[in-house]
C-alpha cells in the first residue's frame, strides 16, 4: 500500500482510466440500477459500484494523499461520488497491474482486480483465463462495453 499511496494527483490524472471503463464496471456491478442498487456480497457492498468499506477506506487514503476530495463510506451509495472514487481506484489497479504483468491491462483485467480484490486476482496469477467462468464472462463484458461494442448474442463459454 505504501507504493500506492505515493501516486500523485498528476499521475492519477495522466494514467486515469477512461470513462467507458468506469461505466462498464458500474454496469457489470449494478446491472445499470444506479442509486437503486441493493447491497451486495451478503450486505457488505454498497452502491452502484458495490464498494466494500475496506476498499473505500484504502481509496480514501490515496485520494487524501493526492489532495483529492474524500467522502465518508455512506457516499458509496451516491452514484456521482461512487464513480469519482471508482475512477481513482480503477486507475490505481491499472497502474499496479501494469507493473505486475508488464503491459497495459485490458479493462476486464482491471475489473477482475476490482471485483476479486488484489489478493483474490493474484491467487489466479493475474491470469484471467484461470478465473471462474462467471467472472471470466463478466470481464469479457467489461472489455466489450469499454471498447464501445455491443455484446455478442452468443452462449457463454463452457468450462
Image (spheres, rainbow, N blue to C red):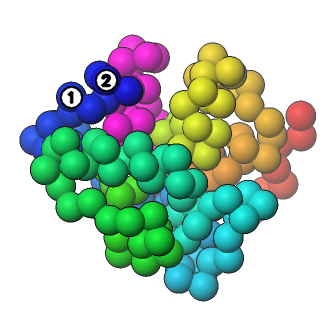
Q: Going by the image, does 103 lie left or right of 149?
A: left
Instruction: Residue under label 1, please give it.
Output: 6
Q: Residue 133: percent from the left, percent from the top?
A: 81, 40
Q: Are marks 1 and 2 in contact (CB under 8 Å)?
A: yes
Name the quadrant of the C terminus. Answer: top right
Q: Is residue 145 visible?
A: no
Q: Position of residue 59 (x, y in %)?
A: 37, 47
The residue at which mark 2 appears reads as 2
Residue 127 located left or right of residue 6: right
Find numbered disc 2 in the image and state the secondary structure of the residue it sits on.
helix
Q: Quadrant of residue 153?
A: bottom right
Q: Quarter holding the N terminus?
A: top left
Mark 1–mark 2 distance (CA, rounded to whole Å) = 7 Å
As drawn, the residue found furthest toward the left would be 10
Residue 122: give x, y in percent of width and height. 60, 22
In reply to whether residue 106 is colored magenta, the answer given is: yes
Q: Determine the residue located farthest toward the right in the rendered image.
A: 158
Q: Residues within 10 Å of mark 2 (few under 14, many from 20)?
A: few
Q: Which residues are magenta?
A: 89-107
Point 49% across, 47% down: residue: 55
Q: Residue at x 58, y 67 (%)?
A: 46
147 on left or right of 113: left
Q: Residue at x 78, y 60 (%)?
A: 42
Residue 14 placed where, x, y %? 15, 41
| Helix, strand or loop: magenta stretch | helix
Q: Is residue 57 or residue 102 the one in the foreground?
A: 57
Q: Quadrant of residue 73?
A: bottom left
Q: How many marks?
A: 2
Amino acid at each position: 500500500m505504501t507504493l500506492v499511496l505515493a501516486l500523485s494527483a498528476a499521475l492519477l490524472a495522466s494514467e486515469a482510466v477512461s470513462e467507458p471503463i468506469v461505466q462498464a464496471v458500474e454496469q457489470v456491478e449494478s446491472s445499470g440500477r444506479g442509486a437503486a442498487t441493493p447491497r451486495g456480497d451478503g450486505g457488505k457492498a454498497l452502491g452502484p459500484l458495490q464498494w466494500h468499506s475496506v476498499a473505500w477506506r484504502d481509496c480514501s487514503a490515496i485520494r487524501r494523499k493526492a489532495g483529492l476530495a474524500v467522502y465518508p463510506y455512506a457516499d458509496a451509495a451516491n452514484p456521482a461520488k461512487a464513480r469519482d472514487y471508482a475512477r481513482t481506484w480503477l486507475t490505481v489497479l491499472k497502474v499496479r497491474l501494469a507493473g505486475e504483468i508488464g503491459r497495459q491491462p485490458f479493462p476486464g483485467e482491471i475489473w477482475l482486480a476490482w471485483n476479486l480484490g488484489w489478493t483474490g486476482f493474484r491467487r489466479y496469477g493475474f491470469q484471467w483465463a484461470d478465473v471462474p467462468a462467471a467472472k471470466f464472462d463478466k470481464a469479457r463484458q467489461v472489455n466489450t462495453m469499454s471498447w464501445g461494442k455491443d455484446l455478442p448474442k452468443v452462449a457463454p463459454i463452457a468450462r
